[in-house]
């Protein structure tokens, strides 16, 4: 019996990223490509209507009122807001430390589209926490504010429930506070900082965290889950080979010990296929595997 599950799954991810316009390096492993896939998916914001909330101390400079209102309406109407993101979105290997550590996006507040399809870069940025249901506008700040603790303070002060899961309990507050520069340095070293709010509450990695290699911890875990699923599938097929033969025969297909198994994607489902006979059976919904 032969199988080529890893190559087939690699093909799924490469096809998706290529269709999005990414140029992919040759001869990449499934693990590496899977991390790239999840990294891109995490950075992209799905187009669906969201309620927009403003932090109680949110201040909009007059010159950015129009641009902010345009972005707010896009969120509310479920329009594409990805052109407002950084042009690093064009890089499949770029890892967004702010997003990976704290789960916060930053948006440019221009109103003109450049030739690449992005909003023309502006100085100030909108920092926002985006969920499936809502967009929480935290503040308008500068590029050097990507490690500013005030961003998490604002979420905790206004909407504590959305990061409550990442609260570290049973730890006493410290008198020695980590600075924004400390956070920036730790992130660049691949270390996920633990931060303390003004009321003494402690949080760790509301965005999932950063690995020592600089990748997203969440993306890395999901990539490991995909690899584990493939290993389990190989064992399952080997253990149930005769059962699969009987199932195929009942459907009018026949294969022997020289069977060759692969994976195909039909609509939104992953199917097991025995390539010498053409027999197929459904395994799972593709997106369910990736959650």
Image (spheres, rainbow, N blue to C red):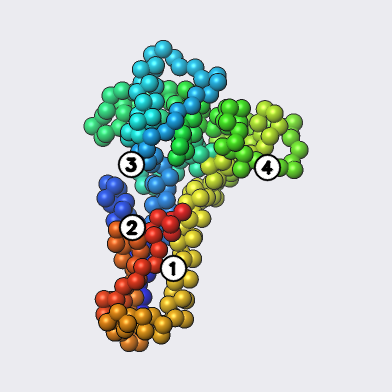
Quarter placement of the N terminus: bottom left
How dense is the environment of label 1, judged by Cα within 10 Å: few (below 14), some, or many (20 and up)? some
- Please identify, in this view, whether the residue under mark 1 or under mark 2 is nearer the observer: 2
Mark 2: which secondary structure? loop
How many C-alpha atoms fall within 10 Å of the one at disc 2: few (<14), some, or many (≥20)? Answer: few
- The residue most toward the top is 62
Q: Determine the secondary structure under disc 3.
A: helix
Q: CA distance from mark 3 to mark 1?
A: 30 Å
Q: Nearer the viewer, residue 180 or 157?
A: 157
Q: Nearer the viewer, residue 228 or 266?
A: 266
Q: In the image, what residue occupies the spot 28% across and 52% down?
A: 18
CA gap, disc 4 to disc 2?
38 Å
The residue to which callout 2 is attached is 268
Describe the element under mark 1 as helix, strand or loop.
Answer: helix
Residue 31 x, y percent position in the rendering: 43, 60
Residue 180 visible in the shown view? no
Mark 3 and mark 2: Cα distance apart in space: 25 Å
Q: Which residue is mark 4?
A: 168
Mark 3 highlights which residue? 90
Q: Residue 230, labelled with which disc?
A: 1
Element assignment for label 4: loop
On the picture, is 270 further left or further right than 277?
right
């Amino acid at each position: 019996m032969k199988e080529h599950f890893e190559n087939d799954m690699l093909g799924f991810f490469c096809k998706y990223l290529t269709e999005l316009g990414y140029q992919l390096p040759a001869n990449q492993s499934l693990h590496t490509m899977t991390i790239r896939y999840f990294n891109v998916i995490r950075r992209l914001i799905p187009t669906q209507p969201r309620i927009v909330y403003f932090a109680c101390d949110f201040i909009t400079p007059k010159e950015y009122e129009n641009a902010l209102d345009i972005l707010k309406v896009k969120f509310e109407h479920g329009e594409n807001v990805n052109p407002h993101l950084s042009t690093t979105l064009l890089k499949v290997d770029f890892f967004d430390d702010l997003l990976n550590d704290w789960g916060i996006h930053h948006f440019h507040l221009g109103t003109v589209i450049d030739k690449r399809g992005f909003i023309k870069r502006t100085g100030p940025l909108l920092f926002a926490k985006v969920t499936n249901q809502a967009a929480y506008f935290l503040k308008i700040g500068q590029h050097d504010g990507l490690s500013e603790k005030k961003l998490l303070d604002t979420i905790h002060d206004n909407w504590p429930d959305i990061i409550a899961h990442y609260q570290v309990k049973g730890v006493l507050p410290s008198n020695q506070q980590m600075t924004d520069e400390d956070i920036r340095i730790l992130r660049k070293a691949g270390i996920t900082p633990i931060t303390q709010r003004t009321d003494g509450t402690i949080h760790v990695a509301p965005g999932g965290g950063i690995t020592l290699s600089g990748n997203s911890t969440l993306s890395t875990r999901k990539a490991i889950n995909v690899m584990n699923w493939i290993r389990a599938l190989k064992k399952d097929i080997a253990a149930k080979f005769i059962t699969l033969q009987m199932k195929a025969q009942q459907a009018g297909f026949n294969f022997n010990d020289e069977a060759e198994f692969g994976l195909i994607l039909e609509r939104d489902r992953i199917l097991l296929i025995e390539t010498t006979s053409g027999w197929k059976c459904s395994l799972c919904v593709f997106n369910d595997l990736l959650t």
